[in-house]
Image (cartoon, grey):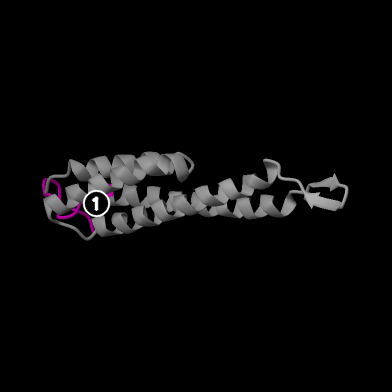
């Protein structure tokens, strides 16, 4: 059902769609980072150092690589799920102040998501544009 020309929308539809697509891409990216961490964790060989009483595990930086990916993936998943929630909430809001405050929250989540769950960088850009559109929306 289309909107008549010259009429105003009661919800920020463009901001809703852009932020929803961006947050979905961020969720997919975070899940892929966690899957990559699990994959790389199973492939890394175990390093052992010879000691006069036997073999002991030797701590190198390679075994810490999956841990860094897991931490980044979990933080990214939390941020992207919050962005998905607020994007879905944006589609149900019609009050200007509520839309603007949700847009500010989405902007903060987009900036945080740039570092941990950028969503192939396209997700970050879409969420950023959607949050700016939500903050400047007028019914």
Instruction: Give the residue at x 16% y 53%.
Output: 98
Magenta span includes 13:
yes
The answer to whether residue 134 shows anywhere in this view is: yes
Left or right: residue 65 compared with residue 52: left
Residue reaching furthest to the front? 52
* Camera-nearest residue between 70 and 39: 70
Q: Looking at the picture, how far across and down is residue 81, in whole percent?
A: 39, 57
Magenta span includes 30:
no
* Camera-nearest residue between 8 and 135: 135
Extent of the magenta region = 1-15
Instruction: Give the dominant element type of the magenta stretch: helix, strand or loop.
Output: loop
Q: Looking at the picture, how far across and down is residue 88, in whole percent?
A: 30, 59
Q: Looking at the picture, how far across and down is residue 128, in whole percent?
A: 32, 40
Instruction: Give the residue at x 18% y 53%.
Output: 3
Q: Looking at the picture, how far across and down is residue 41, in whole percent?
A: 68, 52
The answer to whether residue 118 shows anywhere in this view is: no
Q: Is residue 34 above or below residue 136?
A: below
* Camera-nearest residue between 123 and 73: 73
Left or right: residue 33 compared with residue 92: right
Quarter that holds the N terminus: bottom left
Tally of numbered discs: 1
Instruction: Give the residue at x 69% y 42%.
Output: 62
Q: Which residue is mark 1?
A: 13
Instruction: Give the residue at x 67% y 40%.
Output: 61
* Camera-nearest residue between 17 and 55: 55
**Mark 1 crowd level (few <14, some 14–19, many ≥20, 10 Å Cα):** some
Callout 1: helix, strand or loop? helix
Which quadrant of the view contains residue 108?
A: top left
């Amino acid at each position: 059902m289309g909107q008549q020309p010259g009429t105003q929308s009661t919800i920020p539809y463009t901001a809703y769609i852009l932020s929803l697509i961006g947050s979905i891409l961020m969720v997919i990216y975070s899940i892929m980072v966690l899957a990559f961490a699990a994959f790389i964790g199973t492939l890394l060989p175990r390093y052992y150092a010879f000691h006069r009483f036997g073999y002991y595990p030797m701590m190198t930086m390679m075994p810490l690589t999956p841990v860094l990916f897991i931490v980044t993936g979990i933080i990214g998943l939390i941020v992207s799920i919050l962005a998905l929630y607020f994007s879905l909430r944006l589609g149900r809001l019609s009050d200007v102040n509520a839309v603007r405050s949700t847009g500010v929250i989405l902007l903060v989540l987009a900036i945080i998501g740039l570092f941990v769950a950028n969503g192939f960088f396209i997700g970050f850009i879409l969420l950023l544009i959607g949050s700016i559109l939500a903050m400047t929306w007028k019914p």
